[in-house]
Amino acid sequence: MAYNYPPEKLSVYLSDDAGSVLTFYSLWEASHFAKHWIPFCKKYNVEPRSPAAYFSKLCDPHDACSPTEWSSMKNLYEEMANRIDSVVMLGKIPEELGANKGFSEWSSGMTSRNHPPIVQILIDGRDQGLIDRDGNALPTLVYVAREKRPQHHHNFKAGAMNALIRASSEISNSPIILNVDCDMYSNNSESIRHALCFFLDEENGHDIGFVQYPQLFHNITKNDLYDNSLNVITQVDHPGLDSWGGTLYIGTGCFHRRETLSGRKYGKDYKEDWKRGVERKTTSSACMLEERAKSLVTCTYEHNTQWGQEIGLKYDCAVEDVITGLLIQCRGWKSVFINLQRKAFLGVAPTTLAESLVQYKRWSEGNFQIVLSKYCPFILGRGKIKLGLQMGYCIYGLWAPNSLPTLYYLVIPSLCLLKGISLFPKITSPWFVPFAYVTIGKHVYGLVESLQCGNTLAGWWNSQRMWIFRRTTSFLYGIIATILKLLGISKMGFIITAKVSDGDASKRYEQEVMEFGSSSSMFVIIAAIAMLNLFCLVGGLRKLVVDGRIMGLEPLFIQILLCGLVVAIHLPVYEALFIRKDKGSLPLSVTFLSLGFAMLASLLTIV
């Protein structure tokens, strides 16, 4: 709401899929605080304009602000936050609010999965009586909870987004839509203006369908323990795709033309109606708009329509954002990737290994699902988007199958080392040169690229570890889930990535100590591979020494090196298995299972 943008042109919608009165109460409190916060931000040019982020990062008053005014504003914010926390702890709103407009929508028996549609305009930007403390107009603020019933599939995030598109078309109908995930905040008050520059470009802006900002996080550790920063993807991949017609839609921090989300194809005769967002329905009261919007967010509204297929975000895909962006580009629209010096949006990255792996499992599953469907970029995009962009989509689409060759290289060469079987060229062989050139060149290039993008040397090493972990677990589970879905054995689910951890886990994350702490099957696979390679390295070297073949290492040199690198990259796993005693270590059940699998594989190989 505090963007540096005319408030009469700005409408903010909060989608609460759980339909919680506690969330509505929080937004109601925020609407009152906004009357003080917005003029404060604009008067002193505050950045960032998320009060939680602003007050957590500043210990002293803003240079242009008096200590008294700064303290007064901070107290207002903390008082609001304390009231919200108290209500959440009690689990109910104060009784005196029950009769107020909006709160009366809730009744007993409503649950997060079973509730009627609720649309409440907390601030009507057309109402000249609703102003901030300086007498200026406020942006429109709307609470939306689409109807949910157990017998109706709600289509996860895509369904919530489509409900917002319809509700906003009735209330404000602005030509440009920005969507931001709930775990992210605006870090740059000028990001709207920067994005609009592309849409308003009279020469090259007519065919721009969406403008995508990068997905960045504020809680990345110095050496990026879980490779969450996505620096290389943000600074290399996405800008590179721009030259081929545009980047991917990544689900948050994206400005869309409303027309692109309504299924419209681009034509040279297309002209945007920029006035429709200004000419609001002055004849309709807020109550009338609420009732009309409610009828658009019911469970049955989409029945026998093209919503979720040709209109809005695409359904039946774990990465509804990527497939929706692809469909928009195949309709003739282009996209733009923009990465400002002051980051536009910052979010919360996963702080445990399990959270990170689950997130990549969903991404790899959804992208592989696209490749195997009629929406495959090489099929759907043929003749519609450039070949380079088709290949760019398939880089992510083929994440899941990458698990298979990775597992091969992590297991088979090590077992052959234990058996004394050579798989690679000798170091004196001419064939060793191209093999070494490709391997060394690839990793040196990757290292230099990573360092240029702002990662540290330790950060690059952590990223190598995480890519091995993801390929052997997340991507493997992704390919299995996709195949089971294609065979009709299982249905698609949508797993929300948890972003909250306990205090001890947070401390370990800040100290860059890897968090395990559960008996997840993913951890069993990681630990089993770690133990197998340790057994094979020790056993293979011992066999060579005992048999007196230490001088005959040349045929097995590459396998020894590969196995040694795998052992080195799994050092945090060995610590979690045998050394650490904290709650983030691996449970005994994982230790026994991994040892059992590794020993069984080793014994079968020797026999």
Image: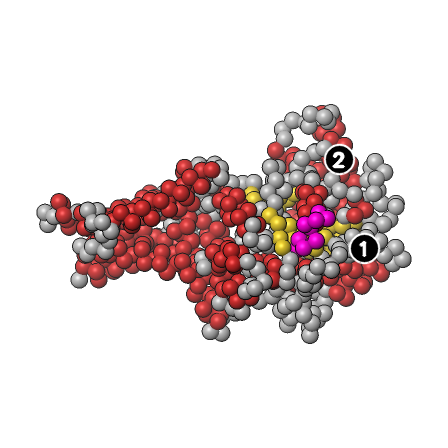
As rendered, which of 281 and 108 lies closer to the eye? 281
Q: Where is mark 2, residue-wise?
A: 42
355 left or right of 335 in image: left
Query: In the image, residue 305 lies at what x, y percent?
Result: 69, 72
355 left or right of 127 in image: left
* Residue at image location 42% in from the left, 39% down from the top: 448
Quadrant in the picture for the N terminus: top right
* Residue at image location 76% in from the left, 32% down from the top: 43
Q: Which residues are magenta?
A: 201-209
Query: In the image, residue 393 lies at what x, y percent?
Result: 51, 57
Quadrant in the picture for the C terminus: bottom left
* Residue at image location 57% in from the left, 60% down from the top: 385
Q: Quadrant of residue 595?
A: bottom left
Q: Where is mark 1, residue-wise?
A: 276
As rendered, which of 320 and 586 lies closer to the eye? 320
* Residue at image location 38% in from the left, 51% down from the top: 468
Render colour scheme? secondary structure
Say what amino acid the circle numbered 2 marks: Lys
Query: In the image, residue 569 lies at what x, y percent?
Result: 34, 45
Q: Residues within 10 Å of mark 2 (few under 14, many from 20)?
A: some
Where disc 2 sits, the SS reads helix
Closest to the camera, between mark 1 and mark 2, is: 1
Say what amino acid the circle numbered 1 marks: Arg
| Main SS category, magenta section | loop
Query: In the image, residue 474 lies at what x, y percent?
Result: 44, 57
Q: Is residue 412 visible?
A: yes
Q: Quadrant of residue 191?
A: top right
Q: Earlier in the sequence, mark 1 or mark 2?
A: 2
Marks 1 and 2, Cα distance to the nearest angstrom?
Answer: 27 Å
Q: Is residue 113 visible?
A: no
